[in-house]
């Protein structure tokens, strides 16, 4: 009878002895390496050190050559149905390795040259390629399936698929570690499943959240405290909210619907910022997602309660860095189904190199549109009327806010406070976006500031703004019709600033 061998070589020793005992009961001889060998031996399991198979001196080259050998790879890869292969196995005394259990050096935890695994990926790749003859297991959570997998070819194939994805995930991190190019010719992005969602964008669409390895994104720290589980839409809105409020050093609040803010504001504290953000557009805030860049205390939570009690306005999700026990208790009483989440402090830097936009069959990789403050010094006042200092501060707030709004985007900032009064987003015409923002602002447009995410192709936006009493305008500049827009502003005494920086968001 041909002996059956299982090769066990793991960094994560979780459950490995229990698995080895099961394999021994199933009639497998166990081959093992280094630390795994010592664990199994100490647990009283009969085990063959790998050097007896390979002939490699133990710990040669500091252990870099433990498993790499003709004997091991041949024992994994040979075709059990090929008479010529079977003849060579006998002639060359190759062990028939029917099971490979392997997980890798922790490059994700300790990225360095020395934690790049070579022998492990070689064994995994060989076993996954020959999955019909050799079972490969890379995840301790799959050890419990070992009895079933031996007679289940479909399950073998699933484990092989998992192994190849595991290798790709591992290698993509190493590629990132070595890469010094801004945009490499070929790129893979390591993603790990973190959350199975209620659904994707719609209830009939299944959805799952994946995050990149070692990300410091606030999404990686989402902690569910109460209420509804997240959908894909909720995840998108939380992300949009975080990207909005992270721009501000002061307390900031954002109410988000469909990936675009409907109210943005800053204040002296979370309560004031949130009060302003909700007041900015209470109609659109209904069913929205609230995101703060400060801890939510009881006073801030009372804003949500007031919105519910006085305006019958429901909030679906609250996502904040922290929340006090009192605030959480109050929100639970306000609406039992409201989802309450924390995500920790928003980091000052990103671990991600690229802002990624996905299309079916491809992705756009680009820089993040950060460091907007650096552009303020390049702004140019192009009208006879100059903005006063207070207006200039509100312009800077407004330009950060418009960056978070879907293009074409135009918004109105309050004449006195850093808060939006009207937002026109996602429009195919700029004057259409301006009209929505101005009409939404209504009387609050008088004396307010109009912010555009790009230039005005015609003077129609300026003339419309003048009808609503706008006192200052911020736009990109650079249109062939700039002179007409400047002239229209001068005619009515509106101050206008060119940013020389577009702020599209799609």
Image (cartoon, helix red, strand yellow):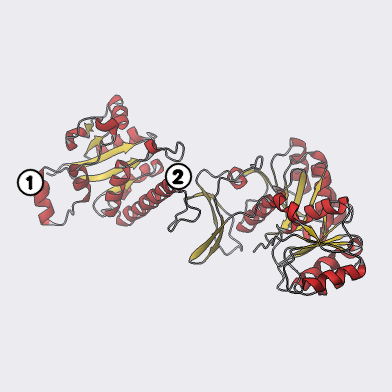
Viewer-closest of 503 and 328: 503
Residue 296, image x, y percentages:
75, 41
Q: Position of residue 460 (x, y in %)?
A: 82, 75
Dots 1 and 2: beta carbons under 8 Å? no
Q: Say left or right for 265 vs 69.
A: right
Point out the image quarter for the N terminus.
top left
Q: Nearer the viewer, residue 62 or 337?
A: 62
Circle nearer the viewer, 1 or 2:
2
What residue is drawn where x is 83% and y is 49%?
275
Q: Earlier in the sequence, mark 1 or mark 2?
A: 1
Q: At 72% from the left edge and 65% from the top edge, which residue is drawn?
A: 454
At a point 80% along the width and 69% down the height, the residue shown is 434
Residue at numbered disc 1: 91
Give how far across and how far down residue 88 sits, in percent: 10, 50
Q: Which label belongs to residue 177? A: 2
Q: Quadrant of the C terminus?
A: bottom right
Categorize mark 2 by other alpha carbons within 10 Å: few (<14), some (14-19), many (20+): few
Can residue 271 be seen from the camera position used here?
A: yes
Q: Is residue 308 visible?
A: no
Relative to 18, 248 lies left or right: right
């Amino acid at each position: 009878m041909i002996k059956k061998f299982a090769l066990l070589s793991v960094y994560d020793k979780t459950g490995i002895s229990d698995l080895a005992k099961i394999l021994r009961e199933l009639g497998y001889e166990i081959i093992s390496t280094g630390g795994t060998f010592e664990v199994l031996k100490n647990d009283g399991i009969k085990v063959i050190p790998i050097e007896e198979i390979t002939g490699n001196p133990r710990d040669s080259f500091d252990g870099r050559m433990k498993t790499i050998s003709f004997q091991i790879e041949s024992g994994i890869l040979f075709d059990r149905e090929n008479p010529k292969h079977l003849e060579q196995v006998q002639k060359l005394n190759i062990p028939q390795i029917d099971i490979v259990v392997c997980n890798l050096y922790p490059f994700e935890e300790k990225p360095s040259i020395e934690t790049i695994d070579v022998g492990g990926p070689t064994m995994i790749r060989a076993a996954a390629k020959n999955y019909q003859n050799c079972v490969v297991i890379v995840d301790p959570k799959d050890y419990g399936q070992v009895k079933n997998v031996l007679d289940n070819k479909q399950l073998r194939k699933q484990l092989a698929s998992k192994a190849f994805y595991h290798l790709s995930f591992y290698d993509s991190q190493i590629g990132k570690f070595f890469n010094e190019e801004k945009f490499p010719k070929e790129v893979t992005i390591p993603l790990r499943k973190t959350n199975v969602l209620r659904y994707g964008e719609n209830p009939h669409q299944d959805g799952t959240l994946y995050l990149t390895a070692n990300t410091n994104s606030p999404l990686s720290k989402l902690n569910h405290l109460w209420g509804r589980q997240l959908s894909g839409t909720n995840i998108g809105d939380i992300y949009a909210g975080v990207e909005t409020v992270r721009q501000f050093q002061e307390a900031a609040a954002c109410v988000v619907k469909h990936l675009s803010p409907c109210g943005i504001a800053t204040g002296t504290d979370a309560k004031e910022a949130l009060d302003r953000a909700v007041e900015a557009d209470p109609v659109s805030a209904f069913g929205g997602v609230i995101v703060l860049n400060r801890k939510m205390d009881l006073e801030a939570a009372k804003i949500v309660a007031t919105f519910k009690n006085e305006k019958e306005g429901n909030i679906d999700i609250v996502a904040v860095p922290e929340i006090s026990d009192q605030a959480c208790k109050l929100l639970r009483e306000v609406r039992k189904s409201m989802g309450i989440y924390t995500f920790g402090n928003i980091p000052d830097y990103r671990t991600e190199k690229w802002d990624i936009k996905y299309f079916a069959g491809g992705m756009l990789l680009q820089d993040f549109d950060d460091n907007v403050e650096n552009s303020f010094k390049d702004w140019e006042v192009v009208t006879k009327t100059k903005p006063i200092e207070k207006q200039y501060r509100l312009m800077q707030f407004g330009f950060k806010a418009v960056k978070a709004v879907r293009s074409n985007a135009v918004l109105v900032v309050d004449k006195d406070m850093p808060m939006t009064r009207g937002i026109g987003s996602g429009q195919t015409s700029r004057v259409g976006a301006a009209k929505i923002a101005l009409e939404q602002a209504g009387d609050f447009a008088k004396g307010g500031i109009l912010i555009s995410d790009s230039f005005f192709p015609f003077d129609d936006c300026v003339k419309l703004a003048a009808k609503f009493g706008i006192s200052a305008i911020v736009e990109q500049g650079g249109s062939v019709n700039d002179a007409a827009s400047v002239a229209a502003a001068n005619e009515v005494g509106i101050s206008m600033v060119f940013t020389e920086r577009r702020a599209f968001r799609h």
